[in-house]
Amino acid sequence: MSANLTRRRFIRLSVACATCVPLASLTGEATAATNQTLRAQYKYQDSPLDGKNCTSCLEFIPGSSATAPGRCKLIPGDDEISPNGYCTLWNTM
Ligand code: SF4
């Protein structure tokens, strides 16, 4: 009997958690995302290389200010690209 109550309570809590987590993501502020797989593949770094940086790259999509993180057309799902960053796909043509 006691085990049944515990099991029931566990199931109720599980359902409540499964419902609350998505709701929390809707009501909270947007969270930053990074695409670690493509960052690694393209050897992304948060600093420039030989004067080359994301700000001067045609693939860069600037953030809300000149110093705010932006996005890269070639690294989807990542909104934390540094304007001073660099990767092997740096492109000005
Ligand atoms: S391709 Fe590389 S250098 Fe260009 S914006 Fe994207 S991450 Fe930065």
Image (cartoon, rainbow, N blue to C red):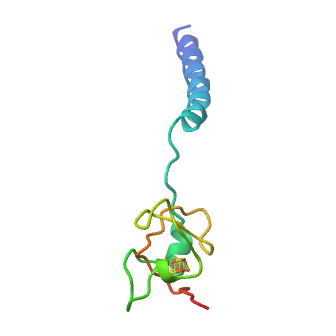
| Left or right of 55, for residue 19 | right
Q: State the image coordinates of residue 37 (x, y, percent, origin top left).
A: 55, 70
Note whether 49 is above or below 73 in the view shown: below
- Count of marks placed on residues: 0
Q: Residue at x 59, y 19 (%)?
A: 12
Q: State the image coordinates of residue 4 (x, y, percent, origin top left).
A: 58, 13
Q: Quadrant of the N terminus?
A: top right
Quadrant of residue 48 within the rendered picture: bottom left
Of the pair 20 and 59, the residue shown nearer to us: 59
| Left or right of 34, for residue 26 | right
Of the pair 35 and 67, the residue shown nearer to us: 67
Quadrant of residue 25 within the rendered picture: top right
Note whether 38 is above or below 12 in the view shown: below
Note whether 62 is above or below 53 in the view shown: above
Q: Quadrant of the C terminus?
A: bottom right
Q: State the image coordinates of residue 23 (x, y, percent, origin top left).
A: 59, 31
In the displayed orientation, state which residue is furthest to the top: 1
In the displayed orientation, state which residue is furthest to the front: 65
Q: Residue at x 56, y 28 (%)?
A: 17
Q: State the image coordinates of residue 71 (x, y, percent, origin top left).
A: 55, 67
